[in-house]
Image: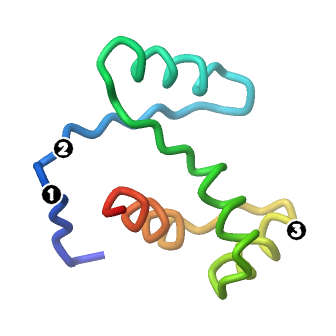
Amino acid sequence: MSEKIVLPGNPKIVFVLGGPASGKGTQSANLVTEYGYTHISTGDLFRAEVAKGSPEGEEMKRIMAEGALVPYQLTVKILINAMKA
């Protein structure tokens, strides 16, 4: 991905990473409460995209049904769209 992404207001972005049930949601909720951040969950974004029935959602549905990980290119695309919104 070579294009430069510019988000309005030059926001501070923090990524919270970890395996299932590692506390990502809990720590994200703490960041929202303590610092007023906006929480964007890739899992929530994926489920919403699948529910929309978009081409990307259909691709994610197939990939997740196989038990595979959604490719980073698609993940980043969905994240950027959410951050712009």
Residue 15 placement, left or right of 42 = left
Q: Answer with mark 1 or mark 3, whichever residue precedes in sequence.
A: 1
- Specify the quadrant that holds the C terminus: bottom left
24 to 26, vertically: above or below: below
Label 1: element kind: loop
Which residue is rendered at x = 66% and y = 88% of the image? 55
Q: Nearer the viewer, residue 14 or 8?
A: 8
Q: Position of residue 37 (x, y in %)?
A: 34, 30
Q: Answer with mark 2 or mark 3, whichever residue precedes in sequence.
A: 2
Specify the farthest residue to the bottom: 55
In the rendering, which numbered label is found on residue 8?
1
28 to 45, vertically: above or below: above
In the rendering, which numbered label is found on residue 41?
none
Looking at the rendered structure, the kind of residue marked 2 is: Pro
Which residue is rendered at x = 65% and y = 49% of the image? 43
- Which image quadrant for residue 22? top right
For the residues marked 1 and 3, what is the alpha-carbon distance in whole angstroms? Answer: 37 Å
Q: Nearer the viewer, residue 26 or 2?
A: 26
- Specify the quadrant that holds the N terminus: bottom left
Looking at the rendered structure, the kind of residue marked 3 is: Glu
- Crowdedness near tag 3: few (<14), some (14–19) or many (≥20) residues, C-alpha within 10 Å: few
Q: Are marks 2 and 1 in contact (CB under 8 Å)?
A: yes
Q: Are marks 1 and 3 in contact (CB under 8 Å)?
A: no
**Residue behind mark 2:** 11
**Residue behind mark 3:** 66
Q: Mark 1 or 3, which is nearer the eye?
A: 1
